[in-house]
Image (cartoon, rainbow, N blue to C red):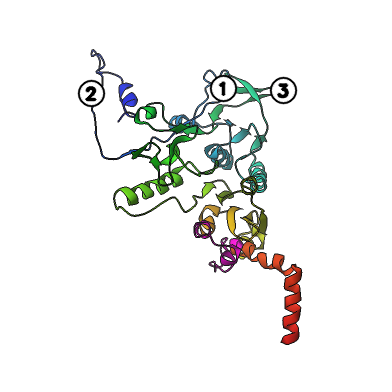
């Protein structure tokens, strides 16, 4: 109700009548769920408003027909809009402050960058825009001027808390939202839960997805606990997907995150070109990358491939059940499908074990006894 009040107040009053303030209501529920979502972040660049920059919601509402779309930022919506507009024949220039898709695994992000360039997207990585001008036009620190017909800002989102006063309820607020425990109850006030992009659960990774997948998982958890009184927690990892062509899907830790967490990392890969589905469709691009501990326990998985968002569910299930590479290798995937690449990557564990000197001695001994 509090978050909806500002929107109601902005409606234009009827002719000849002064605006009437919304009636205040006090609700005293037993439980409260804060699910206000996220709002777009605008980078501190002079002249964005004057240049006609639009957020994703504004861009969709305007329904423009861009001849040359400038995209500032590479959050998931920005990457997906760049890919979609290029497929429709529009000129697209995408600017990023660092490397493309910096939150994703570098190997998979590099493959995505190559795919976008093949579609005709002009990528300007490590760009430093200093101002925007009508046109629209973006001026970079080195003097480069990039002009287009429309400017879309896709610089990420932040938890939407502007219309609330969470501190008044004793809630702990972090840069990533409202701090909660692993069952989404807010610290210092267990009658309040937070869900979706506004929730910052204990132990959540810095690259945790903040879209509809996460919101649906949180909603299901809260309903099971609050309504059905069932024991439940955030045990299963939540995958994230970039719906480009090919799709980039990840679940669990990336290689960099696993190393930062102190794990001795093992990496297994399998190219999608070596699957029968890729051969039949003549779409060989893509790769599967598995991140494992030194004991071969699965820590994370990434996949760059058509329909990777569907296939990554196999790895998500294995992660949720704390399975290792052997269990994933034993998973029988439908043939021909791209999920087959996950099992084949995990099966590469056998090749690594075959180089172990003690195992080689054991194999020789068994051969003599046979």
Task: Say whether residue 305 is visible.
Answer: no
The span from disc 2 to disc 1 (Cα, nearest Å) is 37 Å
Q: Is residue 83 above or below residue 279?
A: above
Q: Find out whether the residues at labels 3 and 1 contact each other: C-beta distance under 8 Å.
A: no
Tell which of 232 and 47 is nearer to you.
232
Mark 3 residue element: loop
The magenta region covers: 316-342
Q: Please tell me whether mark 3 or mark 2 is closer to you in this view.
A: 2
Q: Find out whether the residues at labels 3 and 2 contact each other: C-beta distance under 8 Å.
A: no
Counting every numbered tag in the picture gives 3
Residue 312 included in the magenta stretch of the image: no
Q: Is residue 279 above or below residue 34?
A: below
Q: Is residue 16 left or right of residue 137?
A: left
Residue highlighted by disc 2: 23
The span from disc 3 to disc 1 (Cα, nearest Å) is 18 Å
Residue occupying the point 51% across, 50% down: 239
Query: Which quadrant would the C terminus be assigned to in this image?
Result: bottom right
Q: Position of residue 16 (x, y in %)?
A: 23, 12
Residue highlighted by disc 1: 44
Of callouts 3 and 2, which one flags the residue occurring earlier in the amino acid sequence?
A: 2
Tell which of 327 and 146 is nearer to you.
327
Mark 1 residue element: loop
* Mark 3 residue crowding within 10 angstroms, few (<14) / some (14–19) / many (20+): few
Residue highlighted by disc 3: 142
Task: Say whether residue 269 is visible.
Answer: yes
Q: Position of residue 227 (x, y in %)?
A: 29, 49
């Amino acid at each position: 109700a509090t978050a909806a009040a500002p929107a109601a107040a902005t409606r234009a009053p009827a002719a000849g009548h002064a605006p009437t303030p919304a009636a205040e209501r006090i609700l005293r529920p037993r439980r409260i769920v804060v699910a206000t979502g996220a709002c777009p972040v605008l980078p501190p660049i002079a002249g964005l408003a004057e240049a006609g920059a639009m957020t994703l919601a504004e861009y969709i509402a305007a329904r423009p027909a861009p001849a040359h779309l400038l995209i500032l930022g590479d959050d998931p919506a920005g990457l997906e809009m760049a890919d979609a507009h290029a497929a429709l024949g529009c000129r697209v220039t995408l600017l990023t402050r660092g490397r493309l898709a910096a939150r994703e695994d570098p190997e998979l992000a590099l493959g995505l960058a190559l795919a976008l360039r093949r579609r005709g997207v002009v990528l300007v990585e490590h760009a430093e825009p200093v101002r925007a001008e009508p046109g629209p036009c973006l001026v970079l620190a080195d003097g480069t001027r990039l002009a287009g017909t429309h400017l879309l800002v896709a610089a990420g989102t932040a938890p939407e808390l502007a219309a609330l006063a969470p501190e008044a309820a004793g809630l702990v607020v972090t840069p990533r939202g409202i701090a909660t425990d692993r069952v989404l109850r807010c610290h210092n006030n267990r009658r309040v839960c937070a869900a979706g992009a506004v929730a910052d659960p204990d132990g959540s990774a810095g690259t945790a997805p903040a879209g509809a997948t996460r919101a649906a998982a949180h909603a299901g958890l809260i309903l099971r606990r609050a309504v059905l009184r069932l024991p439940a927690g955030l045990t299963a990892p939540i995958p994230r997907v970039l719906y480009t062509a090919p799709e980039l899907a990840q679940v669990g830790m990336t290689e960099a995150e696993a190393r930062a967490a102190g794990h001795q990392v093992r990496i297994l890969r399998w190219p999608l070109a070596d699957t029968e589905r890729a051969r039949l469709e003549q779409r060989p691009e893509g790769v599967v990358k598995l991140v494992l501990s030194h004991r071969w326990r699965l820590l994370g998985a990434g996949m760059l491939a058509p329909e990777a968002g569907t296939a990554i569910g196999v790895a998500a299930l294995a992660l949720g059940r704390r399975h290792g590479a052997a269990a994933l290798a034993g998973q029988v995937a439908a043939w021909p499908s791209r999920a087959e690449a996950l099992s084949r990557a995990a099966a590469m564990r056998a090749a690594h074990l075959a180089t172990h000197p003690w195992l080689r001695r054991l194999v020789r001994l068994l051969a003599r006894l046979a």
